[in-house]
Amino acid sequence: MNNFPLVPDQASTFAKQVDDIFLALTSLTVFFTVLVFTLILVLAIRYRRGSNVNRANPSDHNVLVEIAWTTPPLILGLIMFVWNVKPYAEAFNPPANAEEIFVIGKRWMWHLQHSANGIRENNELHVPMGRPFKLTIISQDVIHGFYVPDFRMKRDAMPGQYNTVWFQATKPGKHHLFCSEYCGTNHSEMGGWVYVMTPEDYNNWVKSGGTTADKASTPEQAGYDLFTQLACGNCHKDKDSMRAPSLHNLFGRHRSLQNGQTAIADDTYIRKAIRNPEETLLQGYNATMPSYKDSLDEQQIHDLIMYIKSLGNGSAVSLQKATEAATKPAGGANPSAAPASQPVGSATPAVPAVSAGQPAAAPGTAGGSATGTVGGKF
Amino acid sequence: MSVEAAHDAHGHHPVQYHQFEDMEQQNETYIVGMWSFLVTEIMFFGGLFLAYSIFRMNNQAIFTEAGHRYLEVDKGAFNTVVLLTSSLSMAMCVYYAQKADRVKQLLCLGFTLLCSFVFLGVKAMEWSKEFAEHHLPGANFAYVSDAHLSTAKAQIFFCLYFAMTGLHAIHVIVGILLMVVLGVLIAARRPGVKYYMPVEMFGLYWHFVDIVWIFLFPLFYLIPGKR
Amino acid sequence: MSAEAIPPGIVLERESASRPNYLNWSHSVKDWLLTTDHKRIAILYLVSITIMFGLGGIAAMAIRAELTSPHGHLMESDTYNKMFTMHGVVMIFFFLVPSIPATLGNFLLPLMLGARDLAFPRLNLLSWYLFTLGGVIALGAMICGGVDTGWTFYTPYSSIYSNSNVAVTLVGLFIAGFSSIVTGINFIATIHKMRAPGLTWTRLPLFIWAHYATSIIIVLGTPVVAVTLGLVLVERTLHIGIFDPAIGGDPILFQHMFWFYSHPAVYIMILPAMGVINEVLACFCRKRIFGYTFVCGSTLAIAVFGFMVWGHHMFVTGQSLYTGMIFSALSFIVAVPSAIKVFNWTATIYKGEVWFSAPMIYCLGFIGLFTIGGLTGLYCSSLSVDVHINMTYFVVAHFHYVMVGGATLGYLAGLHFWWPKMTGRMYPEGWAKVAAGLAFVGFNLTFFPQFILGYLGMPRRYHYYPAEFQIWHVLSTAGSSVLALGYAIPLVYFLWSLKYGEKAGPNPWGAAGLEWTVASPPTQFNFDELPVVTWEAYNYDVPHENAIVDHSKNVLPDAEGASHSAH
Ligand code: HEA
Ligand code: HEA
Ligand code: CUA
Ligand SMILES: [Cu+2]
């Protein structure tokens, strides 16, 4: 890093791609700017009033010329557009083996939790280089923006909606973490650092319990504790019952709702099911589930979601190979507090048969398209 | 008006303004202006219609339930008929204005005015019922759902309901004020309204108000949803 | 010089000392505040928006001063936030949106069309009152207590969390929005129906076309933002609403509705400036604008396509991949009509007879800076690059290049160009050139470093920032003081010229166009007889009355001499 940088560090797999496009755009800009400036100046000086030049037969229109200078910008523009799609789309599709990090933005701090080992951090994020990480981002209050310039990565933290993005760091070091979306008084101080470490350093860091000694539990464990404590299990048994559906293998499955819509059980869906159960009312069930909107904060809801996820992935049945191939390196850290998961068919007649064979990404929000269902295709 | 007086050298029509060459130009200009204004009005409601469509798309059930269970179709339908009738009488008013038949013009205008009061009256009945049932969004909002649907979304429904019918009602009230002014001027034989243009312009406005309701009524009271 | 040179059909109104003009036929305050004369209303607007520009500029200088140090000592974070909000709100809603249409447009539309006034003079006055009322309310709220939401008013911050005077400001903006709408309607009706005989659509000056397109955008877009801000107001005051996620509402819906207006709004700001450029360029090249039909068509294309790209402000909000792709592709397409304009302007200079007058210098500055600003807009519409630069100083630099380097320079070009017409006086040409040069240099020094800052990752709306960015911020602040000087000088010499400026004849630039056939300043009703137009726009092939024929030196004509030769 020199002392007079024009381009920030390239510290993720996206950085180079983005910088290449940036460079191409800059060449375009320089080309057209120089072209326009030179033409204007040269022509204006040459044809300044009083100068003795040939002004005979000035023309004031020429369709061919118009077409000639309209086409290149159009084509160049569309080329730039297409080139941009790939990296942008990539950021929507985390690789299957990406480890999840849960991010909550609140005024004015970032709260992060590693799903693999449960380590929690505030305004700091430690990651090893060379491994993909998926961020699931939500806000507790207003809109924030999770921005790491050196990664060329940014995603807004919206209230009430999970957004996801992923990255793979490539360069050890300390990188700025900013809040990019204006959020009030201390917006400019809402940030910190992302530490990219070598895998060994990272393992040591994890072993020593991270920076914060809060290694109480993994999210799954915390979720399991909550699940017991709130007695969700009173209704939600291992198998679908008359009272409530089973939550096993729920994640990623298609659900038919009473309002006639179908939904895919992703993070956003489950969050809604816990906070506003009336909005995800399943066909064949009564609206007996209470709303936990006021009693659970985003962290707790996330823990529950992680626990429910650990109960099996309904969409993964046909994708088992892919998931197996992508075993988490840190998988051992998951103590699997939950009962072992087993695929459940449509046990109760009340529940319409749900086929688990459709891992298509959810349309709509990023939260939907990215979660869990990935075969790593792009 | 001093401006007109200053420029009234060549025997203008008495209600012609100084910036126009002749009455024809003035009338055409007024019509273009009025239509542009109506376009802004459409966009004004358009923003709300957009919001409505998005929420409706995502919350079919609650919108259908709230609409069918708590809005009274017969009152809405009655109001639709009232407004349509008023549009008819307004059209006749314009017709008689062109014919320069002052008395019939006033009668039609009076009937239109009557209709608009009836409309507002019925609207007020509906609203007071909603108030009584705590359907006014806010701290006291309460909603009883047959199918245990989301109270929050019901509140959104009523937000949109009050915003859109409220904005419409404001337009009706403005219409009433204009009608009164217009009626008084016509009755007093003021030269400004002797010509049919002001009446015609108001007619356009009134038809617009009517058309908005034609959209509001099915959107809130009628559309069946998948259940 | 003889009168035959003038296109046939015009009855030239001779300037004569005895004939009262629109400025001096009466002097009472009442006659000014209750005037329905489009020219006086234009002057009222001119005064209002100059004050607004000054206030916005002061806020800008406060921002720049604070940012010289990474830990800014001059103000609290809250104050800083209120500063840039006030800067953005004032500059956008109370300066740039009304700038050219409400002053130059108001003044010139009837003159260029050969009409005695706009279609609805009283509505025109109403629009100024609405503007002033809205301005006073919004400014009052921003000065007494302040607003800290940013000019974009994103929910739920604006609707629930902010505890500043958001509601009152919104009321102000709501009212000011109607002034915009009224102006738009007025222009549309005027352009449609009040053209002089013979002035067909294809003979209209491009300035008129630009205002026509602008008015269409205003009429279609402004009501939407009005209703959106209205909904925020309801949500804020009654605590109910459809943008609040806590009760099932949708904050992203707000962004869609806001940008549905506010993207087209950027074209409300740039199109009139482009219109000015056409007039100035044609005059000082003594040539018809190259490719009239294409320039005109591109104006309309911008107005239409401008409504389809709003989502490019929301690439990182979690809007779906495909939505993002559509908006990005359309943004690249909307750049093409702008390219057409830039190239046609360049071609206009070819074989022209270029006179480097002050308006022309502003105009050339506009073309160059708009090109840079526009091209950097393409970085922003590039999906993956925008993920990085969104909400950074790169965007800040982009929009200042188009809005300050582009629209504001265009406004100044027009102001200088038509100043003799509006006031009957010339400004000091030498000073004007100095000011134009200072503005150009100061501008680049202020905002070019911000591109670099932005790409380095400096987020916008940041009161405190990491120390490594400081050098660029200091450069930028240094530039802004040069820029401020470049703006302050015109303010001084314009005022000076009102009293001491040389008298300008009806047509000091020898320009084509109906507005130059009437006296400077024009009389109260513009034309004594209705002009009949038999020529195309920009007919510089025939020499024009009072045209400066002294090719050897670029000096102003002796005003006395000019008006003598007219007789
Ligand atoms: C006058 C105002 C104005 C104008 C004219 C423009 C013009 C354009 N703007 Fe800009 N813009 C703003 C004002 C303006 N903008 C503002 C205020 C914001 C920030 C709002 C906020 O968040 O506060 C913004 C933000 C903004 C964004 C969002 C960035 C972000 O927040 O992440 C984007 C994204 O696409 C964008 C794109 C464009 C494009 C493609 C154009 C195009 O119209 C430009 C077209 C012009 C050219 C391209 C130059 C001429 C062409 C040539 C010389 C030929 C060569 C051309 C090609 C090769 C194609 N703008
Ligand atoms: C028309 C629009 C316009 C104009 C002209 C300007 C002009 C300037 N702007 Fe601004 N700017 C915006 C629109 C504009 N801006 C917007 C929309 C934002 C985003 C706000 C947000 O984030 O919400 C912004 C944000 C913005 C920022 C980013 C703040 C942040 O994100 O933290 C900065 C920082 O440098 C800045 C600087 C400047 C400077 C130095 C000028 C200079 O050009 C100003 C120079 C002018 C003067 C110094 C005035 C000259 C003085 C006189 C003429 C005399 C005064 C007379 C009287 C009082 C009668 N602007
Ligand atoms: Cu959080 Cu800005
Ligand atoms: Cu835009």
Image (tube, coloured by chain):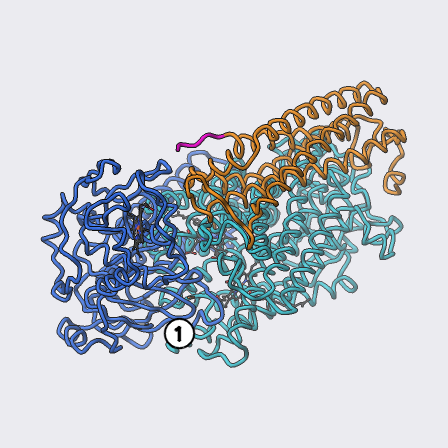
* Residue type indicated by callout 1: Phe
Report whether residue C285 is seen: no
Q: Is residue B225 magenta?
A: yes
Report whether residue C167 is seen: yes
On the image, the x and y values in percent for residue A272 come to 35, 51
Q: Where does ligand 3 appear, by image quarter? A: bottom left
Residue C506, above or below A199: above
Residue C324, above or below A179: above
Identify the residue at horizontal 89%, vertical 29% (top origin).
B189
Where does the N terminus of chain C fall, quadrant-wise?
top right
On the image, the x and y values in percent for residue C407 come to 56, 54
Question: In the rendered image, which quarter is residue B88 located in?
Answer: top right
What secondary structure is the stretch in magenta mostly built from?
loop
From the viewer's side, name the closer residue of A15 and C493.
A15
- Colour in which chain B is shown? orange
On the image, the x and y values in percent for residue C172 come to 65, 56
Dot 1 corresponds to which residue?
C469
- Colour in which chain A is shown? blue
Q: Is residue B62 left or right of residue C553?
A: left
On the image, the x and y values in percent for residue A120 come to 27, 71
Chain for mark 1? C
* Magenta extent: B223-227
Q: Is residue C133 magenta?
A: no
Secondary structure at numbered mark 1: helix
From the viewer's side, name the closer residue of C88 and C78.
C78
**Which chain gets the cyan colouring?**
C
Q: Is residue B26 left or right of residue A167?
A: right
